[in-house]
């Protein structure tokens, strides 16, 4: 019987709770899916901190570390994750943590960060020469403090066991919930596409989320920089694609009259609010179709097109191809399980 992979997440005061619990829930859910098939659990989960016991996280409640980090031999862990959060700045001066990560890097199979946890890995000197990402709000800080690091702003994560575009050993993920995307990629590599897809369905999320830098659409990162007054609105839109994103709804969310929103949006972003929403919906639909996660009719519903014919017309308008042809042309085959 294969030995379960030990997954460790190091925690500290004011850690972002979703950076910790999101990825760990993915691994736990993978265990559940395996057990439903009569197979043994693939993962054991561990929280490490300066000392055993409760650690107050960003949400105001405590996570409980089951081991003191310095008491643990890094070699026992298959994967170590470093989360981000408000407490990162203090941890950049935590010499014990930085030294432990330096010892861990050559001994663990995989070492990754979630969100602004990339700043900790960079401070430990472990990201030099790597292509990395982090939370959009920490991109400039990471670039300024660590010019020897190749920072990619428009990525969900940089885990790539094939080595073609990223790294399968030291890797990073963007803001907060992208830690879940990263964990799904790890599960897919370890256990195969069907288990990862089952976990994604169980958690009601994409196996591979549309967009680049992540928690938003790929259109948000540059657009929010150009139009900071709309940053909150642009962040909100991708999570509401199946709902009502009419001009009146968007105007209410932006606290502007509809005509004012249209005029200012057009001036600052070069398109109407309706056109922007349509682009984001096409992007989301493209990602779902490319990875064969569901039917065209379901994609139409999930992305707010209501009817497959509306999706078809919009695809032809933007991409000059039908949704079905797009799926056939760009669809991918799930990766095989990792036997290592």
Image: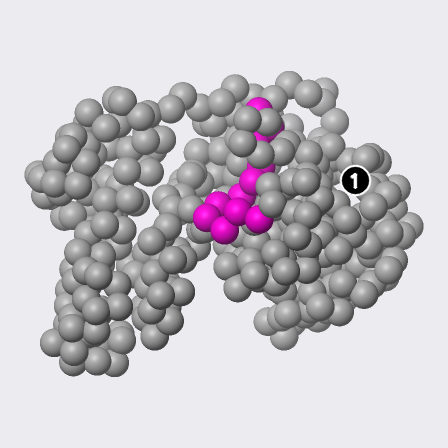
Queried whether the magenta region covers residue 155, the answer comes back as: yes
Q: Which residues are magenta?
A: 151-162
Q: Which residue is mark 1?
A: 105
Q: Residue at x 42, y 39 (%)?
A: 208
Q: Position of residue 1 (x, y in %)?
A: 72, 20
Q: Identify the secondary structure beneath mark 1.
A: loop
Q: Nearer the viewer, residue 198 or 288?
A: 288
Left or right of 132 in this view: 126: right
Q: Residue at x 82, y 54 (%)?
A: 98
Point out the image quarter for the C terminus: top right
Left or right of 238 in this view: 209: right
Q: Nearer the viewer, residue 92 or 4?
A: 92
Queried whether the magenta region covers residue 259, the answer comes back as: no
**Residue 30 appearing in the image:** no
What is the magenta segment's predominant secondary structure? loop
Q: Position of residue 181 (x, y in %)?
A: 50, 44
Q: Residue at x 23, y 44 (%)?
A: 282
């Amino acid at each position: 019987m294969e030995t379960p992979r030990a997954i460790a997440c190091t925690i500290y005061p004011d850690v972002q709770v979703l950076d910790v619990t999101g990825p760990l829930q993915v691994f736990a859910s993978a265990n559940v899916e395996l057990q439903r098939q009569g197979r043994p659990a693939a993962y054991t989960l561990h929280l490490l901190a300066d000392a055993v016991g409760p650690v107050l996280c960003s949400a105001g409640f405590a996570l409980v570390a089951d081991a003191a980090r310095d008491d643990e031999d890094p070699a026992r862990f298959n994967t170590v994750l470093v989360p981000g959060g408000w407490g990162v700045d203090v941890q950049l001066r935590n010499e014990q943590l930085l030294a432990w990560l330096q010892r861990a890097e050559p001994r663990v199979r995989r070492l990754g960060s979630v969100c602004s946890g990339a700043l900790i890995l960079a401070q430990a000197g472990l990201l030099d020469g790597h292509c990395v990402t982090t939370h959009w709000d920490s991109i400039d800080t990471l670039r300024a403090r660590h010019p020897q690091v190749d920072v990619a702003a428009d990525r969900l994560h940089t885990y790539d066991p094939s080595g073609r575009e990223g790294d399968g050993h030291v890797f990073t993920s963007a803001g907060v919930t992208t830690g879940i995307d990263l964990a799904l990629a790890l599960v897919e590599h370890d256990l195969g596409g069907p288990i990862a897809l089952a976990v994604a369905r169980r958690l009601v999320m994409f196996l591979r989320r549309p967009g680049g830098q992540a928690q938003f659409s790929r259109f948000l990162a540059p657009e929010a920089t150009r139009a900071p007054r709309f940053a909150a609105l642009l962040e909100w839109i991708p999570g509401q694609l199946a709902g009502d994103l009419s001009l009146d709804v968007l105007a209410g969310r932006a606290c502007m009259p509809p005509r004012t929103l249209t005029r200012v949006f057009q001036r600052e972003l070069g398109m109407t609010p309706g056109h922007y929403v349509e682009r984001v919906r096409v992007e989301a639909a493209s990602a779902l179709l490319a990875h064969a996660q569901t039917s065209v009719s379901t994609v139409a519903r999930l992305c707010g097109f209501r009817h497959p014919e509306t999706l078809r017309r919009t695809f032809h308008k933007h991409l000059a191809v039908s949704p079905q042809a797009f799926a056939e042309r760009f669809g991918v085959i799930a990766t095989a399980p990792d036997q290592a």
